[in-house]
Image (cartoon, rainbow, N blue to C red):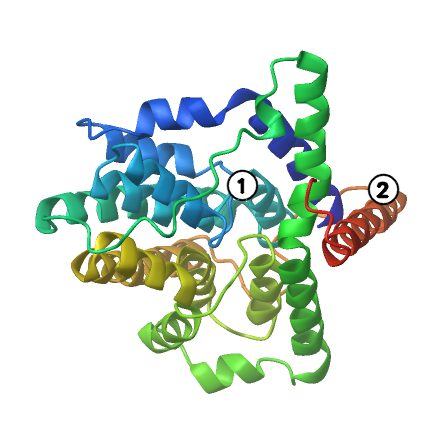
Amino acid sequence: MAPYLLFGFLATAISVLIVKPDFVERHLGSASKFSGFKAALLGVPLPLCSCSVIPVAVSLRKHGASRGATIAFLISTPQTGIDSIFVTYSLLGPIFTIVRPLAAFVSGLAGGWLVDRFSSGKDDGNDSSHPDNRECSCCAKNPGSRIAAALRYGFLAMPRDIGNALLVGLIISALISSFLPPNFLGNVMGTGLKPMLLMMVAAIPIYVCAAGSVPVAAALMLNGVTPGAVFVFLMAGPATNAATIAAVWKVLGKKTALLYLLTVAALSIIFGLVIDYLFTAANISASGGPMGHSGLPLFVKNASAVILFILIGFALLNRLLGKHEI
């Protein structure tokens, strides 16, 4: 997946140049009729994980975005991004690649509508979680500075943000593939709704990175877990975690937090069923091997893997040394 992830980092850098913070606030920072739709749509390609999306969503809320738009952004954004879309294609193939951003958009739109429809009243939280409003280097007016800042974000900040989760995901996928008997998890979890519900319960409270979850998902499928259950993991894991749930509860209130969780839980099951149907209809064996495409030359894959680990190592070393300017 290394070549695809590096290309995703490049696309992320380009997106930073195109989509500026003032553009996001201008379109989402108001309680307009279509703000929920725009929030769900804009959140799909943005490369924000389920923790870094919290201050952005809080800032949107404090700039006038409706509860529904805030929740739509919170649900759709961490589920996928430019980088994770490329990684999904590399390991899980076109079906997951198409359905994953679609599910992020639909669930964000549904969550925003439910919150606007059934949640009202003042926010229960306070201003303690207001993010730092200093202008980032990507907003600099000098074109050369902006390009350099965007490249730093794509190839240094992004590896720093997802590095730990990605490495943990790779280790877990290696352990599953190496030490569990073939189809062990599939035989234990079974088929139908049962494995989806198990995955949903396990994934909702833990932090799962959208890109880092993909190698784990691939290993689960190779060990016999149904594609639908794997999709529930890919959707519910990044969309929720204990920190996000606590933040929504604190800032937007308990009713909004419950609607947020209900939306993610219900839509992950629905799209899990859709994935199972598509795999059955296409007569694809999920445990027969990697779903992604491996047509690149071996030297390109190996060189990309070396570059990827160098980037992650450099970014994590900077974080350990306290150098957060990247």
Q: Residue at x 40, y 32 (%)?
A: 42
- Considering the numbered disc 2 on the image, is that residue within a helix, a strand or a loop? helix
Q: In the displayed structure, would residue 232 be above or below residue 310?
A: below
Calculate the distance from the C-alpha at mark 2 to the C-alpha at mark 1.
Answer: 25 Å
Quadrant position of the C terminus in the picture: top right
Quick one: SS at disc 1?
A: loop
Residue appearing at x 35%, y 22% in the figure: 26
Q: Position of residue 198 (x, y in %)?
A: 38, 77
Kindly tell me whether residue 233 is visible in this rendering: yes
Q: Residues within 10 Å of mark 1 (few under 14, many from 20)?
A: many
Residue type, label 2: Val
Residue 65 position, x and y percent, is 26, 34
- Pointer 1: what residue? 47
Q: Are marks 2 and 1 in contact (CB under 8 Å)?
A: no
Q: Is residue 299 above or below residue 19?
A: below
Tag 2 residue: 300
- Residue 37: image location, x then y, percent: 27, 33
Indicate the quadrant where residue 61 lies: top left
**Amino acid on which disc 1 is placed:** Pro
Q: Camera-side residue: 159 or 1?
A: 159
Q: x%, y% of residue 215?
A: 63, 61
Q: Is residue 61 above or below residue 218?
A: above
